[in-house]
């Protein structure tokens, strides 16, 4: 966690959202969570809406079907077009509705964001595709780094402790699949993270919660 004006150990990375460069050094411009994705360093604020970034993996909801595309909601101000060439399927013109319908959930990667915040997405790549089963829980996008944890440590803790499977989107949507009990436990853990993610000692509190859930 960093505070406004705090110098960031960013090496040769470029300043991204929530940061600025002065006198050859990079500083935080907001209070939030430090996120380094080479070659960019950014600070994700403790509160605020989802701001799409190139390379983000997000969970999107299909809203509108066109002859060669779907418009999907990624939690941004505008729907994003998913062209049928950006899927692993061989689709003919006018057949999009046979593959995805409004309300379907998909994991996609943001390929481009222009200066007007128009977004392009793709479903081609490892870990991307249509979601089946389970539920989708919404948390604040600013708490996503805390849900993921350092090198994925928090996700591993939640999955190994409950037996659930998870996919976390940078837009704050989290897919959870498993037994009813495991889904309920993960949802409650996510609510704790969403509510207390800015506090220190979060991992210990989640471990205690999971232990208590298993013993009850």
Image (cartoon, rainbow, N blue to C red):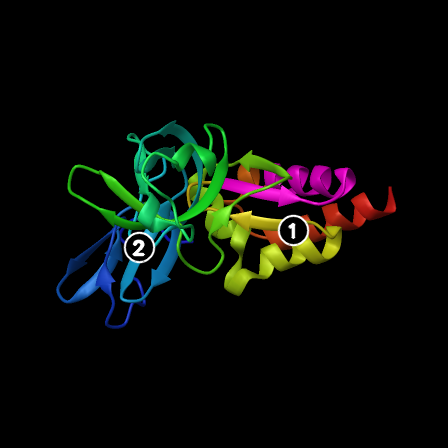
Crowding around mark 1 (Cα neighbors within 10 Å: few <14, some 14 to 19, many 20+) is some
CA distance for labels 1 and 2: 28 Å
In the image, the segment drawn in magenta is: 173-192
Could you tell whether 137 is left or right of 100 in the image? Answer: right
Q: Foreground mark, 1 or 2?
A: 1
The dot on residue 165 is: 1
- Say whether residue 175 is magenta: yes
Could you tell whether 157 is left or right of 195 in the image? Answer: right
Could you tell whether 31 is left or right of 17 in the image? Answer: right
Q: Is residue 137 above or below residue 167?
A: above
Q: Is residue 85 above or below residue 26?
A: above
Indicate which disc, 1 or 2, sits on the residue closer to the N terminus: 2
Can the viewer see residue 150?
A: yes
Residue drawn at (20%, 65%) of the image: 25
Question: Residue 21 lies in what quarter of the image?
Answer: bottom left
Residue drawn at (32%, 67%) of the image: 9
Q: Position of residue 120 (x, y in %)?
A: 27, 44
Q: Position of residue 93 (x, y in %)?
A: 31, 38
Q: Position of residue 19 (x, y in %)?
A: 25, 53
**Farthest front residue?**
92
Pointer 2 residue = 42
**Farthest left residue?**
23
Q: Give the structural element (helix, strand or loop) at label 2.
A: strand
């Amino acid at each position: 966690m960093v505070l406004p004006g705090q110098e960031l150990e960013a090496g040769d990375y470029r300043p991204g959202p929530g940061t600025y460069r002065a006198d050859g050094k990079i500083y935080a411009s907001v209070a939030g969570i430090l996120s380094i994705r080479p070659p960019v360093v950014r600070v994700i604020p403790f509160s605020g809406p989802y701001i799409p970034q190139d390379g983000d993996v997000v969970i999107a909801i299909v809203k509108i079907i066109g002859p060669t595309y779907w418009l999907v909601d990624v939690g941004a101000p505008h729907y994003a077009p998913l062209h049928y060439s950006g899927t692993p399927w061989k689709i003919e013109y006018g057949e999009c509705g046979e593959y995805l319908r409004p309300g379907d959930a998909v994991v996609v990667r943001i390929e481009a964001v222009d200066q007007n915040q128009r977004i392009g997405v793709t479903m081609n790549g490892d870990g991307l595709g249509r979601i089946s089963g389970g539920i989708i829980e919404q948390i604040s996008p600013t708490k996503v780094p805390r849900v993921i944890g350092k090198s994925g440590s928090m996700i591993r803790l939640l999955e190994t402790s409950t037996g659930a499977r998870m996919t976390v989107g940078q837009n704050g949507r989290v897919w959870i699949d498993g037994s009813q009990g495991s889904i309920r436990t993960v949802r409650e853990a996510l609510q704790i993270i969403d509510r207390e993610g800015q506090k220190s000692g979060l991992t210990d509190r989640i471990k205690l919660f999971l232990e208590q859930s298993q013993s009850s």
